Structure formats: C-alpha cells, structure tokens
Image: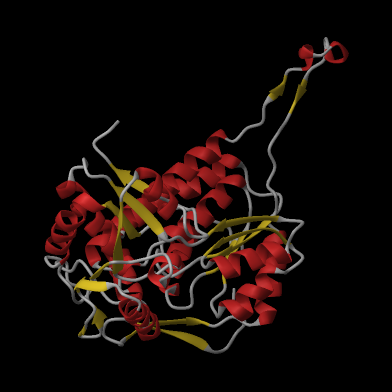
Amino acid sequence: MNGAADTLTVTNPFSGAIVGAVPRASLDDVNRAVHHALTHLPAPPAVVRAEVLERAAQLVATRHDELARTIAAEAGKPLRQARGEVTRCVDTLIFAAVQARSLAGAVVPMGASTAGAGKIALTTRVPIGVIAAISPFNFPLNLVAHKVAPAIAAGCPVVLKPSEATPLSAMALGAILTEAGLPDGFLTILNGPGETIGAALAVHPGIAMISFTGSAAIGWELARQRPRIRVALELGNSTPVIVTSDADLADAATRIAASGFTHAGQSCVSVQRVIVAATAHDRLRDLIVARVERLVVGDPLDPATDVGPLITTAARDRVVDWIGEARAAGASVATGDAVRDGILLPTVLTGVTPNMRVFNDEVFGPAIGLTAFDTIDEAIDLANATRYGLQAGIFTGRV
C-alpha cells in the first residue's frame, strides 16, 4: 500500500551498481497506513497468526540463497555472513510462531487474601495496538523479522520503516508474509528517509508502540517525544572486552578478530575496545594482527570475502577521520588504516585512550583499539568509561 509516484533507488555499496528500486512513501502514505492497520484490530486468532509465521519460516528457508544475495547486494554484508542472517530470520519466525500459540494470561491467587477467599480471577493478554517499527541497514532482514514477527504473534498490526539504504530485504520479507497468508495491511512497509517518514510515523496518534533500532540520539528523542506510549529501543555501543594476563590469548585473538570485523564492524555488539593486561598486551596485539591480516577483503558477493565495504562512502570517510584523530592524539596503527578498492582495511590501533572518539563513541566500522591496564579494577573502570552499556565481555583463566 503506497500512493507515492516516485521511487527510491538502492545501490550496491561495493560496486555502486543499482540493485533495485522501491516506492518512496509520502506523508499521506503514513496516515493511510496507520489507519488501515487500525482496521485489523481485533487481530486474527492466534492459531491463524502462528500458521502464517510458520509458513513464512518455511518460505524464507526455501529462498535462503536468494535472500542472502539480496542482503549482500544492498548492505555490502559478506555473503557467508548474509547466509547466517537468513538462518537467524528463520529461527526468529519460528520462535514467534511458538509464542503466538502460547501467549496467555495468568490465574490471580485470590485466596491469598481474606477479601479474595472463595473468588476466582484471571488476566488475559490483548494486543497493545499498531506498532511503528523502524529498522536499520546492518541486519536488513533479521532485524525486520525481530520487530515484525513478535508483533504478528501478539496480534499487533505493524507499519514498518526500514533503512532507506537497505529496503529490498524488508520488502522481500513482507512479500513472503503476504504469501504466507498475512492479511493485506496488517503489515505496511513505508520507504523513505527517517527524518521525514520515520519521524511522521513515530508521532502519529494512531501508534500504540514504537520499536526502534538505531542511533542513541534518535532513539532517546523518540522516547522523549512519546512519553505516554511504550518505546522499545536497541541503540549503540562501544563494546569493551577485557583480556586478563592468564586468558587463552590465541582464543581471545581469534574471537576478537571475528567479532570486531564481521560486516565491517557495523553491528552494535561488534568488539571495539580491547582492554588488555599490560603484561599480555604485545602478545595479544601480535596474535590479533596476524588473524586480522588473514581476513579476505573484497566483493561481498564473493563467498570467500570476510570484510566488505561500509554502507556508504561517507560512513567510510568518517571512520578514516576518527582513526586519523586517534593517531594525532598518540595512538599507533598496528595494521590497516588504508582504503583499497573503496574498502577501509580492517584496522587495529594501539595506545588508545579514553579521550579519543574511537574509545568514547561508537565507531561502527572496521577498527578496534587496544588499551593496556595494570589492575582488574582499572580494567573495569575503563570498560565503564563511556555512556554506553549494551554489551561487554571478558577473557580470563579464572572461573
């Protein structure tokens, strides 16, 4: 459902080639979509919703390679990682179907009170209403599924605004859900910029809940604008990992290299800050560098590729600038910090300190920084020395 006449062009971040086009929504489309979604309340029975999700999971599995190639083409995510995302999408749909069949209320223990003796009471669950879902580019299929599938399970119609950089995966999943039997208008996808379409959707009075994944600045502003409705936020991070001197350094290096550079570091849980015991610093640095330099950098549609491009050249140039700022402030480059075929090579910095943006802010790119510590209390303080708190890890020989 989209009354807009113009289209949004989608390009491959690696080659620049046009890979598709989708209808561009208008502000009128936002209003029509929400009002159409409201007509689907009350929702179809739980068994119907569960069956739709189960059929959708089967269809996604059947079209696994096609969907993975769509992700790789529009997001620049290496094909092997895109295939993993499709597999996760299947799981997400199945989990949601299970929830649709098991959502229930509870019996209230009235007999626990003198006033309630001999009485029976129970609660039941009802859909909260229409969900505004705003999803990012970095998991263009599974993060859409994370929002849409639970909403369907709960009986909540959805108006989805995917990233304008990666709408093709969302559109493909929407078509699959329709094919699986989801009523027309229960899910409407609106394509366009977040500052217009996303903003209008978020403040629409017909919206009962907002589910947003993206930057902290935008997420907290949405929560401020809509204090009387539920707002679910998944925001950024500057993920720290502490590595103690007695840890298995080879294992830590392998896992850090994998986490730090999957999808070119464009994940809110990508390892960014490696806080390592000073006595183990040089050994861990050398192990990480050796593993990072073995990563295959190139075309995301090549099954051998480990690291592809950032989503835009502007995103790449920002990360390059941050690395340059860190170097000017005293950090050193152990490997990387070069652009080849438009791709920023995986970069490892040492001597990173809390005054640097590569420490304080979310890099969201293929760069990790090592910071040495002397005591575990110092390590914990360093891990906590940012405004983020989404995820952290530790490698240690102690249990």
Q: Nearer the viewer, residue 2 or 180?
A: 2
Query: Quick one: quadrant of the C terminus?
Result: top left
Where is residue 332? Give x, y as percent. 24, 73
Query: In percent of the image, x 20 and y 76: which residue is there?
Result: 299
| Quadrant of the image occupied by residue 30 | bottom right
Does 193 sit left or right of 394 as displayed?
A: right
Residue 33 visible, this angle: no
Does 169 sit left or right of 289 as displayed?
A: right
Q: Nearer the viewer, residue 21 or 273?
A: 273
Residue extending farthest to the right is 115
Where is residue 192? Give x, y as percent. 55, 80
Where is residue 135? Give x, y as percent. 51, 65
Q: Nearer the viewer, residue 144 or 286?
A: 286
Residue 256 visible, this angle: yes
Where is residue 152? Give x, y as percent. 56, 51
Number of on-image labels: 0
Query: In percent of the image, x 83 and y 10: which residue is there?
Result: 117
| Quadrant of the image occupied by residue 100 | top right
Query: Quick one: quadrant of the N terminus?
Result: bottom right
Query: In percent of the image, x 13 and y 60: which residue is there?
Result: 286
In this rendering, the answer to whether 310 lies above or below 379 is: below
Residue extending farthest to the bottom is 6
Rendered image coloring scheme? secondary structure
Does 241 sit left or right of 207 as displayed?
A: left
